[in-house]
């Protein structure tokens, strides 16, 4: 029984050391810099253009009829 307790204590110590090493590594990792160009939208897409060009064309036709 005493040997089992010793082995268990050794395993727990090794697990705790591994966890602390991992947490220390996480703390030393540099934060990623924000890159706005990665989130920049370049403009409306083809679905938006199709919808709004058709709406604009119908508005122009209605305006010419008046």
Image (cartoon, rainbow, N blue to C red):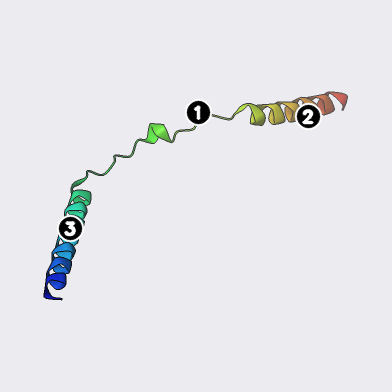
Helix, strand or loop at mark 2: helix
Q: Residue furthest bottom?
A: 1
**In front: label 2 or label 3:** 3
Asked whether, in this view, residue 18 is left or right of residue 34, the answer is left
The residue indicated by pointer 3 is 20
* Quadrant of residue 62 within the rendered picture: top right
Q: CA distance from mark 1 to mark 2?
A: 26 Å
| Contact (Cβ within 8 Å) of mark 2 with mark 3 | no
Horizontally, residue 32 falls left or right of residue 61, namely left
Of the pair 12 and 2, the residue shown nearer to us: 2
The numbered mark, 1 or 2, whose residue comes first in the sequence reads 1
Residue 40: image location, x then y, percent: 45, 33
Mark closest to the chain's N terminus, 2 or 3: 3
Q: Which residue is mark 2?
A: 59
Disc 1 target residue? 42
Q: Which is closer to the viewer, label 1 or label 2?
A: 1
Say which mark, if any, is on residue 9: none
Q: Is residue 65 left or right of residue 41?
A: right
Q: Under tag 3, what secondary structure? A: helix
Q: Earlier in the sequence, mark 3 or mark 1?
A: 3
* SS label for mark 1: loop
């Amino acid at each position: 029984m005493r040997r089992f307790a010793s082995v268990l204590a050794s395993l727990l110590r090794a697990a705790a050391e591994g966890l602390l090493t991992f947490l220390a590594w996480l703390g030393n990792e540099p934060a990623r810099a924000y890159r706005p160009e990665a989130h920049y939208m370049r403009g409306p897409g083809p679905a938006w253009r199709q919808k709004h060009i058709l709406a604009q064309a119908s508005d122009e036709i209605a305006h010419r009829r008046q």
